[in-house]
Amino acid sequence: MARFSGKTAIVTGAASGIGRATAVAFAKEGANVIAADKSPNVHETAAIIAEAGGAVFAVEMDAGSEADVNQLAQTAMAKYGQIDVLFANAGIVGSLLGILDHTEKDFVDVLRVNLIGPFLAIKAVAPFMVAGGGGSIICTASVAGIRSGAGGAAYAASKAGVINLVQIAAQQLAGSGVRVNAVCPGLIETGMTQFLYDNARAKGKEGQIGSLNPLRRGGEPEELASAVLFLASDEASYVNGHAMVVDGGLSSSHPYNRQEFGKCAT
């Protein structure tokens, strides 16, 4: 029997990459999927699921807008009558400039989507889960949120915030039956990282992609989807307030390249 048969899963950032792979994986496991994204490409994700016989409803929305997030939760309830899983995955990279070169707008724009977005999603969805007897919330953090050296300043700070946010939410939802966890991807080929992959391939250095981690390769969106489905499932019934790292071992060591003042990535 499919692990999520009869259950409803909301996936934000579902237009591509990790979000699309996870939405498709949930549908294959029997879930009714609400696929949400600011990009109209979310309808392509819905088409992939529908063509495979899955149950799906696509929503165009802004993950950093409280009105949009609240409407998303209401749509899921109106369409399927329950919310069992939330994967708050929507995110943006933002500027890769050094911290002294970031503008206030750089930080605000990234935090609005990457950190305030998951907060709004938890706030909107958790009451429905509590009323339904429980559920599982997973937020996308990053290895960049564990320590410096794996992303721009605003991006890394936002993802560190996500890790703490799920710990707070797990504690404050104690006794409700709602579990809250995070996944911390390493280098995965998605729309966010496509420029890195494209640059490497253009220079004939594709073989160096992911070379800093022990597996010596980048990850695939489907590998993250598998981790998310585990955290959402009853198999992870005793996993709560946890940030699961899926990075090929990258964060098991310190980076080789030292960052110095005046020599940050541009």
Image (cartoon, helix red, strand yellow):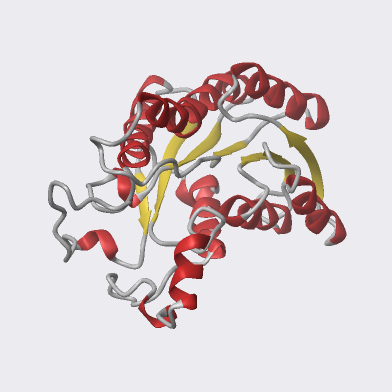
Q: Could you say which quadrant of the image residue 124 lies in?
A: top right
Query: Which residue: 79% across, 32% down?
Result: 80
Number of numbered discs visible in the structure rendering: 0
Does residue 109 lie above or below 253 as drawn? above
Q: Could you say which quadrant of the image residue 111 lies in?
A: top left
Whether residue 177 is visible here, answered yes or no, is no
Q: In the image, is 113 to the left or to the right of 52?
A: left
- Picture coordinates of residue 11, whole percent (x, y): 63, 41
Does residue 114 lie above or below 151 as drawn? above
Q: In the image, is 205 to the left or to the right of 233?
A: left
Query: Which residue: 65% across, 46% down?
Result: 14
- Picture coordinates of residue 156, whole percent (x, y): 32, 42
- Picture coordinates of residue 158, whole percent (x, y): 37, 34
Front-lying residue, 120 or 92:
92
- Picture coordinates of residue 8, whole percent (x, y): 70, 39
Query: Which residue: 62% across, 19% down?
Result: 131
The quarter of the image holding the N terminus is bottom right
Q: In the image, is 53 to the left or to the right of 151?
A: right
Does residue 231 lie above or below 253 as drawn? above
Whether residue 29 is visible here, answered yes or no, is yes
Front-lying residue, 121 or 208:
208
Query: Which residue: 46% across, 69% down?
Result: 199
Does residue 3 lie above or below 204 as drawn? above
